[in-house]
Image: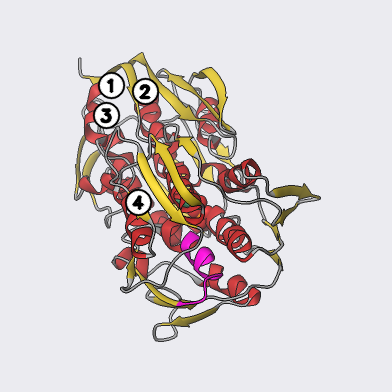
Amino acid sequence: MIVGGSVVVPGDKSLTHRALMFAALARGTSRIEGALTSLDARSTARVLRQLGVEVGPLRPGAVVTVRGRGALRRPAVRLHCGNSGTTTRLLLGLLAAHPFRAVLTGDASLRRRPMRRVTVPLTRMGARFEEHGGRDGLPLAVRGGPLAPLEYELPVSSAQIKSALLLAGVAGKVRVSLREPHGRSRDHTERMLQAFGYQVRDRAGWLDFEPTGSLVPFEFRVPGDPSSAAFLVGAAALAEQGTIRVEAVGVNPTRVGFVHVLRRMGVPIVVENEHERQGEPVGDLVASPASLRATEVEPAEVPALIDEIPLLAVVASRAKGTTVFREVGELRVKESDRLGLLAANLRAVGADAEVSGDDLHVGGGNGAPRGYVRTDGDHRLAMAFAVLGTVPGAKIRIDDLRCADVSFPGFPDALRSVSRHR
Ligand code: S3P
């Protein structure tokens, strides 16, 4: 396959969720340009509306207006968070500081995902939770109220846990100190808080938040999502010829671990037109094919590429040698058992892959990948295997590629637009 052209990917998912939530807490009208309009972003918009916030429609290319009232209101219905773990966990942090009861639920995948990782520290701050049948998952009721300050070591490096606790600190106006075990997870929440005048500082590995700022209405332009761009960059890495450019993508260092790993595997990737936009680094990613070699991904690298492991693993299946992803057990609790399914699907298309403890080993080869891929509705698995399906002679059938809409609406068209078969 030959790749070529310039593409723009939809807005960053993490930044869209956060911008919507911050706007919801501010009193007045905020405007968000370039917001992601995917199913996950719509889940955040929908539940915020159910909490009394006026959120305009999320349409591609349109500016989203959000009218917040300074606080959320008691919902009349259960809050359905769809497939979105970020919506659920960040919202639990916000609701922990609001004096009413709310019930959160989601689709079958989300209901299985662990929530105690946020409810345990939020309980220490003073919020109360009722689990359904004593199970760690959704549905879950939260009853918020006045909160106490928190000092807490996270069990896993996770931006969702960290952000939930920081948002509880913001809404409850209390101090929060956190520590992540391995590597720093994405820091978008911290950057946004600093822009609103909150003190967020690093103190010998601890992140210290002080409720010094205040949320005011704002205008924000969301850059392209590097996690979506990664799939197109991966298609370039696997191609025979050509160059692609993904324009105006977020290149925050806590998000672009995949760029470093692909470069180690031999892929020429350049960041051009780099600039800072509202506290976030943005640039174009320019990538070309390469003769690929295996690499080892260390535990400290994992937080900055947690969502890109499916893509990196399919690229690794075309490299010379065996690539090892160390300590990636967190993938078991993503939108699917992403670790088990990733290995099983790689094997299903003829590649070598094995899970050993919490490590994933992927052997490289150049036989044409052929077989049937079962995604369990996991958008990132579907997109990764669609990318693998672009290699010469590939015949990959994917049970559900429509689930790409969770994070990357228009993915099949974007992939086609950069790919030309000889
Ligand atoms: C996200 C954090 C990550 C990531 C998810 C989005 C966020 O989850 O997998 O897609 O926006 O904070 P964890 O922080 O739980 O690893």
Question: Disc 1 marks which residue?
Answer: 418
**Secondary structure category for the residue under label 3:** helix
Pointers 1 and 4 in contact (C-beta within 8 Å): no
The residue at 27%/40% (across/down) is: 59
Q: In this view, does 165 lie to the left or right of 224?
A: right
Q: Earlier in the sequence, mark 1 or mark 4?
A: 4
Across and down, in percent, residue 344 comes to 33, 53
Query: Label 1, label 3: how many angstroms apart (C-alpha)?
Result: 6 Å
Within 8 Å: ligand 1 and the Cβ of disc 1?
no
The residue pinned by badge 4 equals 55
Q: Say which residue appears at 59% left-offset and 71% top-offset.
A: 122
Residue 359 appears in view: no
For label 3, the crowd category at 10 Å Cα-Cα, with few meaning under 14, some 14 to 19 and many 20 or more, is some
CB under 8 Å between discs 1 and 2? yes
Residue position marked by numbered label 2 in the rendering: 236
CA gap between label 2 and label 4 equals 37 Å
Highlighted magenta segment, given as a residue range: 90-100
Disc 3 target residue: 415
Camera-nearest residue between 337 and 48: 48
Closer-to-camera residue (383/267)? 383
- Is 226 placed above or below 123 here? above
Q: Is mark 2 on a helix, strand or loop?
A: helix
Q: What residue type is labelled 3?
A: Leu
Cα separation, mark 3 vs mark 4, equals 31 Å
Tell me, yes or no, whether the highlighted magenta stretch contains residue 311: no
